[in-house]
């Protein structure tokens, strides 16, 4: 909320459909909920038929380890239904003009594939603004999707919206504007941006790799190693 204006969808009862939640230890879809790592095939719970989606972090209780007027730190041990263990730390720092968030996924007793990201649900319309949200970003490519919404591995030119696509190679990071009322600039060290545009919201989701990377070319972390993602939201008013 900025100056009393709620920017995120908050009314949806399904935890997958509101707020801005972390996606760990994977982001987006894992095809059929299955992946093979080190010769072992693992089955994840099917959470968006017929796939597993968005990890387990958004459904798990996090432990609060630090709290102040300007920041918070939380941690989470990865347990069943995730089969390979691991630990996650999330830290957020707030200033008058920016929210900066960091996610760190660490392998503990075993090597593991890992992804990290966030899933914000931005409202199309906000209070005291006559115009709906306008999303802009630099030219990009998208991961081609098959008829099951799984990337084929090919990169193609973006189709026209509406989107449920993973963009990459952005030349300028996303900017969200609600008329002249508010501008929100998003930045991340993540290379991929999942953009989903249902009628009531716009989801602009930084993530470390494209959906189903566990079955394509996963980022692998060894015990004691970490994968770190950052996400910054910087706002200005009256433009």
Image (cartoon, rainbow, N blue to C red):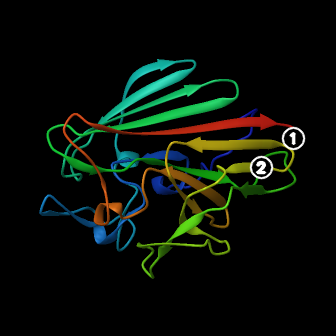
* 3 or 23: nearer the viewer: 23
Q: Secondary structure at mark 1?
A: loop
Q: Quadrant of the N terminus?
A: top right
Residue ID for mark 1: 239
Note whether 180 is above or below 73 in the view shown: below
The reply to whether residue 1 is in sight is no
Task: Estimate the x, y position of residue 14 in percent, counting from the top left.
Answer: 48, 57
Mark 1 neighbour class, 10 Å CA radius: few under 14, some 14 to 19, many 20 or more:
few
Position of residue 69 relative to residue 64, above or below, is: above
Front-most of residues 114 and 7? 114
**Residue 10 showing in the rendered view:** yes
Find the residue positioned furthest to the left.
Answer: 39
Of all residues shown, which one is farthest toward the bottom? 147
Quarter occupied by residue 39? bottom left
Tag 1 or tag 2, which sits nearer the N-term? 2
**Residue occupying the point 31% across, 36% down:** 76
Tell me the CA gap for discs 2 and 1. Answer: 9 Å
- The kind of secondary structure element at disc 2 is strand
- Could you say where residue 239 lies in the image, as x and y percent from the top left? 87, 41
- Determine whether, in the image, residue 103 is placed left or right of residue 218: right
Which residue is located at x 64 percent, y 54 percent? 171
In the rendering, at what x and y percent does residue 11 appear?
60, 52
Residue tagged 2: 177
Disc marking residue 6: none
- Pick out the residue farthest to the top: 68
Left or right of 93 in this view: 7: right
Mark 2 crowd level (few <14, some 14–19, many ≥20, 10 Å Cα): many
In this view, the residue in front, 217 or 75, is: 217
The answer to whether 37 is drawn above or below residue 22 in the figure is below
Q: Mark 2 touching mark 1, by CB under 8 A?
A: yes
Q: Residue at x 42, y 55 (%)?
A: 209
């Amino acid at each position: 909320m900025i100056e009393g204006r709620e920017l995120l969808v908050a009314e949806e009862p399904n935890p997958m459909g509101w707020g801005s939640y972390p996606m760990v230890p994977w982001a987006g879809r894992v095809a059929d909920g299955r992946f093979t790592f080190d010769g072992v095939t693992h089955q994840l719970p099917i959470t968006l038929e017929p796939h597993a989606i968005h990890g387990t972090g958004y459904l798990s209780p996090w432990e609060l380890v630090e709290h102040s007027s300007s920041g918070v730190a939380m941690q989470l041990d990865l347990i069943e239904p995730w089969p390979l263990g691991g630990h996650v730390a999330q830290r957020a720092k707030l200033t008058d003009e920016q929210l900066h968030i960091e996610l760190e996924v660490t392998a503990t007793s075993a090597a593991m594939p890992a992804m990290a990201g966030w899933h914000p649900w931005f409202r199309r319309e906000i209070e005291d603004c006559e115009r709906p949200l306008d999303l802009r970003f630099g030219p990009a490519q998208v991961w081609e999707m098959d008829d099951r919404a799984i990337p084929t591995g090919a990169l193609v030119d973006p189709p026209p919206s509406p989107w449920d696509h993973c963009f990459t190679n952005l030349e300028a990071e996303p900017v969200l504007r609600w008329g002249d009322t508010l501008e929100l600039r998003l930045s991340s060290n993540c290379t991929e941006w999942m953009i989903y545009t249902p009628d009531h919201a716009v989801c602009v989701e930084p993530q470390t790799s494209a959906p189903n990377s566990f079955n394509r070319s996963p980022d692998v972390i060894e015990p004691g190693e970490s994968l770190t993602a950052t996400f910054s939201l910087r706002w200005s008013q009256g433009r």
